[in-house]
Image (spheres, helix red, strand yellow):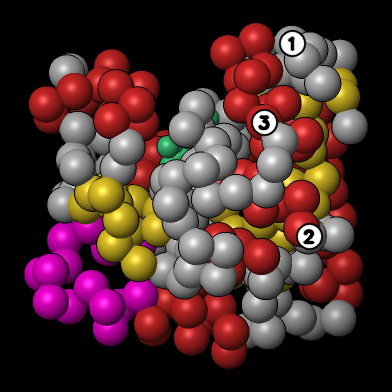
Amino acid sequence: SVFENPKIASVNVAHRIAALIKSKQANNAPAVLGLATGVTPIAVYAELVRLHKEEGLSFKNVITFNLDEYYPMAPTAVQSYVTFMNENLFDHIDIDRNNVHIPDGTLALEDIPAFCLEYEKKIGDLGGLDIQILGIGRTGHIGFNEPGSAPNSGTRLVTLDDLTRRDAARDFGGKSFVPTKAITMGIGTIFKAREIILMAWSRKKASIIKKAVEGEISGDVPATYLQLSENVEFILDAPAASEL
Ligand code: GLP
């Protein structure tokens, strides 16, 4: 769907997440959310915080799994996705911190495979993700699944694309300070979610959105794999949809 502006679109997405949380609460069940970082979902989180503060929406039954984290990365670093999630969402709501999962950027290399298997298992044991929200990188990555990612990939350590590191350079004060790797959920992990919402705003995303939605399905643009799922919705503003 194409919305008039990112704010209206983000409020719409937040209200869908809130509806899910409430319907799960009514059944005493957990709501399992797959969350994303980046500029794109910030207004969604802001609306969820507003719903908590002004309308009493509780997150006590919410369990979250973030898509990715840089590697290596200290959780306390300003650029970490832990810091991002705390500042934009978790510090402002009543979620139980034990229910928050973000890939661990402090692991020793040899411990990463076991951590990734455990991450998958935790999601699976809960019955899978109810909703996964996604942004999209200019390489066509979702999470940090860069070109070359396999459609059935699971959570794993990946190498970041040069373009991705250039786009992140501003946050790190130069590309050379951007980590070369990340731990990300796989395309296969994302695919198992019952509902996938990919959001993109602005003209800057128009050409990658055209490729993702209309382009040939290929590992060269990992987001094209979403064309194979029936549970995906693209939520766009008019500039991001302008090449469709
Ligand atoms: C990062 C994140 C992605 C995100 C992308 C786009 O690479 N790992 O999950 O979708 O950036 O970021 P932005 O929303 O800031 O454009």
Gap between marks 2 and 1 measured at Cα: 24 Å
Tell me which segment is drawn in magenta.
103-116
Query: Quadrant of residue 61 in the image?
Result: bottom right
Instruction: Say which amino acid is labelled 3.
Output: Lys
Q: Secondary structure at mark 2?
A: loop
Sequence-first disc among 2 and 1: 2
Query: Quadrant of residue 109 in the image?
Result: bottom left
- The crowd level at tag 2 (other Cα within 10 Å; few <14, some 14-19, many 20+) is few
From the top left corner, tell me how far across and down residue 139 is, in percent: 47, 33
- The crowd level at tag 3 (other Cα within 10 Å; few <14, some 14-19, many 20+) is some
> Is 91 in front, or is 156?
156
Q: Residue at x 11, y 26 (%)?
A: 176
Figure check: 15 above or below 27: above
Residue 239: mark in rendering: 1
From the top left corner, tell me how far across and down residue 230 is, in percent: 85, 59
Figure check: 65 above or below 80: below
Q: Which residue is mark 2?
A: 229
Q: Which residue is mark 3?
A: 211
